[in-house]
């Protein structure tokens, strides 16, 4: 700490204080980190003792008894005196416990790299659970609107009908795909382990009487205790930083589904088909009380931009290792890892809130469908007309001419309603009467294709997720700032 | 095509023409793409016929007979006339075959998105195989130098000994980890399928008599034919672009391992411990004939920077879908997807070449070890001295004072050799004689920790890969420009 | 070239062949580059001769006479024989001229770095001129719609009125700001010059009799000839790669204004307020003839994503120089520099086309204004009501309650028209009659604030640009694919 | 604030608490921001009063008297009650002053966008001054080592001699170039001004009796008061976010020069030519006391990676404006703007510390020169030999053969010293005797080219900077953690 620190105003971490959940913030707070360090030290002691290192059970018990006593000020004082952060934390823990049996045969990185992986892993578990809740909430919305017909848009222009539930399922499938990647990563994410200064396990081997099997077992058991299924064999001083990139890239992929959802919600808000609701104290928008701004959706898009920045940071670390490693990654990881976790956590919280609070204006949706349907149905009309025996190319050009004329009329104000059906019915070149055309329109469900069935496929996928993680499904987000 | 095109000089794609392999370039060349399109059309026809659509077997046979007749000029002429690229290619294929039974119930995206996924998939298979070869080549180098002692560096400064094979295994493990992700992605990568204009399968359903099971079966069988294990249920007009991001992020992760290797090779070249060899016509460096530049390693680092750019491009597409999709991603994917494939392909080719041609200067390596060993051994000396009964802190400061003095002497020229052992032996405060210290140094293997065993772990992992992909292991790279 | 090259299909550069203009492509084509190299060599010879190096005027004349004879095949053959690209091009040029007086005292980088800077500079000049045309075209559109009232949106929701010309001016001002950066960069962009292998001018000094003033003059004069106002003093083997980043960051900033414009155009297309027009053969969208897709605007957004990738590539090169330089940047710059130029060139071409072809639906715009105006006018009504003597807070809540009720009614279909004026007129708590309220609405110009004057400020700024670059203002874009 | 906030541990902003200077942190701290807001409000009141708005001088005086009384808790309580952050801060300030004459005719963005620009501008001024100090410190080092001959490296391999001062000047020129961009940006950076909800100045015009000249004057004078030379004419609700990108891209360019310097320092540390010194309590590296790690240089490289992430964030905001703007950029700017400032601030602090503390090992440098010189001199020997009348190509191949043999011998241990001079002297095919060759080596200054003069050019450039900013030159960095 610099001498001038007393003059420096405190600046809280924006993401932690405003957007991330309490559980996530705890993992990355100064206290939280120290708790995890102590959890790691204790796990190591237990295994070292089991492998014959001279650590008495009462020492371990003494450390365990004080593990929750985190005094940041005291640690800070020690660090100023020692000018070494890890030593300060060792001394503090030992002083509390009255023993000196932690950190045996360990270098600083044996502590820090493994603790940071523990933070990463626990954060991913939190996010995994919250993604379960997000999938379930989205599935509920998709189920509710399984058959609510809406105008699907491509190029942001009406294209064909679909259902609102099907649109939700579209984003839901993307989220589910990202979710499976996160599950897979939790399986394959490997712990660095106690590899010493350059990765060769030199010091643990010395401690364990140069028994290579004991050193390997030590790592395996610690990993198991901490929840890791894999351990690296060949890292240097540090684990490969492409692992950090992998983690953030999975977060980014999950965030992409939320961001796609949010962008389309913003577009629909612009067409007044739905809104985020007034829940969030929109009272405040004093000048323009009618406005129902999609602020939370905008925020989700902002979160994705933040994730892009953290992705960039970790991407740069990947492929930039010099020899067995150095600390050019240190300040980067210190920022990027917690921030990326806070960001996706905040995005999932916000997403859950949107799903709880959104208002859907079915009447406005129906109005839009009515206006666009004649256009959207042209493909179907063409098929019907061909079946009645017209030349495909000729009929296509008949339809196109009328459709373009109607579209222009609606835009230039010369037409109030979409009368394409009437025009085609009146045109002798088109082999269907107005009545026949109206009959086609009378069954709008026929334009939906497989949309409702596709929703079901999404619901089934989410049901399987819920079964794998039953406790996570019903998480309720905290209130949003 | 613009009218002024005749005046426009041809500019070949840099990555395709200079760095990527023939097999990869074929997949993405104009001809190659048309071949894949036809493969897709034929697969679809076969399944549609099997499901009762009226497509005679002889029509399919006719298409198959001409599938290899790719006349770009003719297609180009059609495109200029029709002003529609997909139509031009449909007409050309139909004209060649003498039938009009392709593309039934399909929109343009049913063709293009699926073909691009086919290009992506086949490219990943090529890269997977080349990564197998890279792993095997690196394993061979690691095996050869399993016990070649070198100075491991952290902060680019000598830290502890390791072996050269262990250093290779470090990069190898990272490459292997990325490789496993690529294998997993090939399993999970889902085909968009024939979903029509907004994703609801409307047109295929019409074609198949509104039988939803038939429409689902159609997609499943086509996917199977083309090698895909999964099909999306709920895409819009396009598959979620986060899939493109996922693909490129896996490529980036693989490239990171190559890039880490290359960077350390460049550092070692600067210490004259090895070189890329003179194989690559370094004769050219006319002004400075002694120079053995690590140009290929530099190129690999350059490739990783390119991949970062393509990662950025696909990252932006992810999370930016509007409604059911549009073509704001089109020009991006047209550039980023083939370029990313060409880049990693070129990087793997270059990596294989480096491994074949590199010269390792064992004598220089041994000299470096000799000079640094007294420093590197201080941890071990400290332990031995403590065992002989000294206070840990006291002894540490004795060692540190001598070590710093020697380090300064070597730097300021007052010392020619590292005489730390002699100094400690002479110092009465240190409880070991020069002879005892020399005895420690006489067995340098003791400083290597588990390094050789760790190499074996890497060799075993590669052996498992080789068994899964026996044909890919012995690929020989093409000559490098 | 690899032996298998004959089997490798040609893959044209996508950006050059499809999007960039002929003038831009020429600068970066293989022939174009050779022309620039020869221009540089001749400029150097002229100055060396002027400074006393023994180069006869007839030699220079001989080189000049053949400078346009570019035979790529011949150069290729030489390169295969020599295995050195620069040597091959030297030999070719010398063989054509019958002299050997080029490249005196030069290393390869003295050629390549300077030629690439010449390509960069000339490209920026092209883009500068095209940006002038873009500003002028946008100014014309802004002038035309200086008073066309539209609904301004924040959060994509109606907020207050503005004019369409004012909206164009908003994007125009951003473009103008980027344009000024490009002009400034053209002033400050420094040439590397003839600095030799590590930057110390060793070889030119030898050639010029160790006269440092002569060596400095040589560079200054060459720079002047080629159009550069500045020369670096202290580069290494290469100029600092942060210069490449600076160039692409300026391109990116220019592209951002185009991209902002395009995104809002896409949003307006979704509200059917305007379209790109049918000019571009939209006939092709066979299935859905009514669709007026903003494909060119989407493409501009795609171009910006590409620029982001090239920005990333050059950003990575900046800050990654090792000692006096190496070629880890080579493959990156080979891709990123021309591609970035092609991309912004294509974006400007596309932008000019959109401005020429777009259709604006004034009737639809007026309809939207009519529907939203009561909401947009609430701020003004509040002020008028307060002036008539009501409590600000009370009146605000009166307005808000009615406004929210109307907004809900419009969304849920219970209201057909926005009757906020009537409701307020009827409410005794609001101190204005319906007639008084209607009087406020009768003068919609009062809601426009300074919008028309602000348009004029933009027009004036563009007029100054046009005066600085009169020839560039009326550029017509080539037809778009 | 969420109800659960009491449970949330405080997480300080990493960059603010560990790396940025007190002055910078103050600008972005919660208190600092409120101070700037109040400064802005007061400036606006003064100008509004001058233009006739009814604001009594004693009101302004009352606000000024309490402007420094920042009670975050009180503001927080108000925000919880009002659910609106800007309103809370208005009420607090008014309650303190006992008046209600701030924020007249303003929307929230009129406050926030302008205050953030003020933070940006003041931060850039701080960085500008610190960059002056960095340039001066680097110039001092360059001057000191103007003639200290070192081995210049390309491809990280010895190439030709240069001087250490010249190497510093190389990075210095890059820093100076970036510095000029920052100076230029401070000139051109425009204030958004009081444009109201959609940019049309509607509310200020109402306040000022619809006098457009008054509204323009208001903005101009406020800008002048706050130090801005430019005001935007045509922004929407927000200023174009490409301005944020421009700011961060200039920071990134400055950081690139520091990063280049740091990377080469790390390489030189690996060759033991210099170190960061033991100043920074390296005592701590307990296990390996001899290590002199370039931790600060590594940190500077880490800072550049962070800047890349913030660049990415702001790059995404540029070109993503929807209509007149929204808050999808809000959370991004909240993170990226202060973080980018903190990061470059920390990097400059670190850089200044490195320059103060670094140790240069001239003896080791001389040893390296001695070993490499025969290689580095081959170009000169070739010229001398040609002058004595040998065929250039023949002599080149003679030199090359010997050089390669020596290089191999040094690497394989068969040679202890570089005896290239002796070999050439002995070779009858080479027309110079050993004595003649030694004579060439005896004057090593001849190999330095213009290096010392080039250093002078850098010193002159810095001298001009110092004259423009005399007070900034001698800044002393705070102690580093």
Image: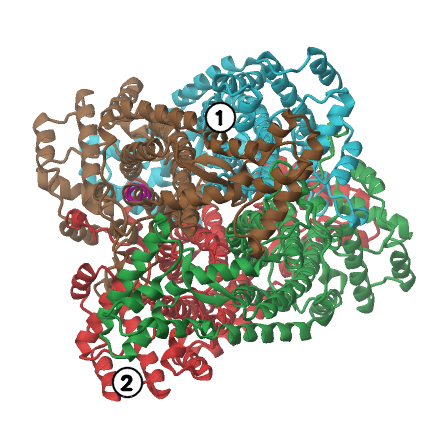
Chain colours: A green, B red, C brown, D cyan
For the question of whether residue D298 can be seen, the reply is no
Front-lying residue, B144 or A316: A316
- In the picture, the quarter occupied by the C terminus of chain D is top right
Crowding near pointer 1: few (<14 within 10 Å), some, many (20+)? many
Q: Is residue D396 visible?
A: yes
Residue C129's x, y, as percent?
27, 32
Q: Identify the element where label 2 is drawn.
A: loop
**Residue range of the region highlighted in magenta in the rendering:** C347-354
Q: CA distance from mark 1 to mark 2?
A: 67 Å
Q: Which sits in the foreground, C99 or D463?
A: D463
Q: Is residue B316 above or below residue B355?
A: above
Q: Is residue A418 above or below residue D101?
A: below
Dot 2: few (<14), some (14–19), or many (≥20) neighbours within 10 Å? some
Q: Is residue C404 left or right of residue C210?
A: right
Pick the front one: D481 or B67 = B67
Question: Which chain letter matches label 2?
Answer: B
Numbered disc 1: what chain? D
Q: Residue at x 51, y 50 (%)?
A: A270
Instruction: Provide the major secondary structure of the magenta segment.
Output: helix
Query: Which quarter of the rendering shows the N terminus of chain D?
Result: top right
Give x and y (percent) for residue B247.
46, 63
Q: Residue C353: say if magenta.
A: yes
Per the image, the residue denoted by label 1 is D189
- Are dots 1 and 2 on a single chain? no
Q: Position of residue C407 (x, y in %)?
A: 58, 48
| Residue B55 numbered mark, or none | 2
Q: Which mark is residue D425?
A: none
Q: Is residue A140 left or right of residue B239?
A: right
Quarter occupied by residue D111: top right
Could you say whether the residue bearing mark 1 is in a helix, strand or loop? loop
Q: Please name the residue shown 48% across and 50% down the image.
A: B263
């Amino acid at each position: 700490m610099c001498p001038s620190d007393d003059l420096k105003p405190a600046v809280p971490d924006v993401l932690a204080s405003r957007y991330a959940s309490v559980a996530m913030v705890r993992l990355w707070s100064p206290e939280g980190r120290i708790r995890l360090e102590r959890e790691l030290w204790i796990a190591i002691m237990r295994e070292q003792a089991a492998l014959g290192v001279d650590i008495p059970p009462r020492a371990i018990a003494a450390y365990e008894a004080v593990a929750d006593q985190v005094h940041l000020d005291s640690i800070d004082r020690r660090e100023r005196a020692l000018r070494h952060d890890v030593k300060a934390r060792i001394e503090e823990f030992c002083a509390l416990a009255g023993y000196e049996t932690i950190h045996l045969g360990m270098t600083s990185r044996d502590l820090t790299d493994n603790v940071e992986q523990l933070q990463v892993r626990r954060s991913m578990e939190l996010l995994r659970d919250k993604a379960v809740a997000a999938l379930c909430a989205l599935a509920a919305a998709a189920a509710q609107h399984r058959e609510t017909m809406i105008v699907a848009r491509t190029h942001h222009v009406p294209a064909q009908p679909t259902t609102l539930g099907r649109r939700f399922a579209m984003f839901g499938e993307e989220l589910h795909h990202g979710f499976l990647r996160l599950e897979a990563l939790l399986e394959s994410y490997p712990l660095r382990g106690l590899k010493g200064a350059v990765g060769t396990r030199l010091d643990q081997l010395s401690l364990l009487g140069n028994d290579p099997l004991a050193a390997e077992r030590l790592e395996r058991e610690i990993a198991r205790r901490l929840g890791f299924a894999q351990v690296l064999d060949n890292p240097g001083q540090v684990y490969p930083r492409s692992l950090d990139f992998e983690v953030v890239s999975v977060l980014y992929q999950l965030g992409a589904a939320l961001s796609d959802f949010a962008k389309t919600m913003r577009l629909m808000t612009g067409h007044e088909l739905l809104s985020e609701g007034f829940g969030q104290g929109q009272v405040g928008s004093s000048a323009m009380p009618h406005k129902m701004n999609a602020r939370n959706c905008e925020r989700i898009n902002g979160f994705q931009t933040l994730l892009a920045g953290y992705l960039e940071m970790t991407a740069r670390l990947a492929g930039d290792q010099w020899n067995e490693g150095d600390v050019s990654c240190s300040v980067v990881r210190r920022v990027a890892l917690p921030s990326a976790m806070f960001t996706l956590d905040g995005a999932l919280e916000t997403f859950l809130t949107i799903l709880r609070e959104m208002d859907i204006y079915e009447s406005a949706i129906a109005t839009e469908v009515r206006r666009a349907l004649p256009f959207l149905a042209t493909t179907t009309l063409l098929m019907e007309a061909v079946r009645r025996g017209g030349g495909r190319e000729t009929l296509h050009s008949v339809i196109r001419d009328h459709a373009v004329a109607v579209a222009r009329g609606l835009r230039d104000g010369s037409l109030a309603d979409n009368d394409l059906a009437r025009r085609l019915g009146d045109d002798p070149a088109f082999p269907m009467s107005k009545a026949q055309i109206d009959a086609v329109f009378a069954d709008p469900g026929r334009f939906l294709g497989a949309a409702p069935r596709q929703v079901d496929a999404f619901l089934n996928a989410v049901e399987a997720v819920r079964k794998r993680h039953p406790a996570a499904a019903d998480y309720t987000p905290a209130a949003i700032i």
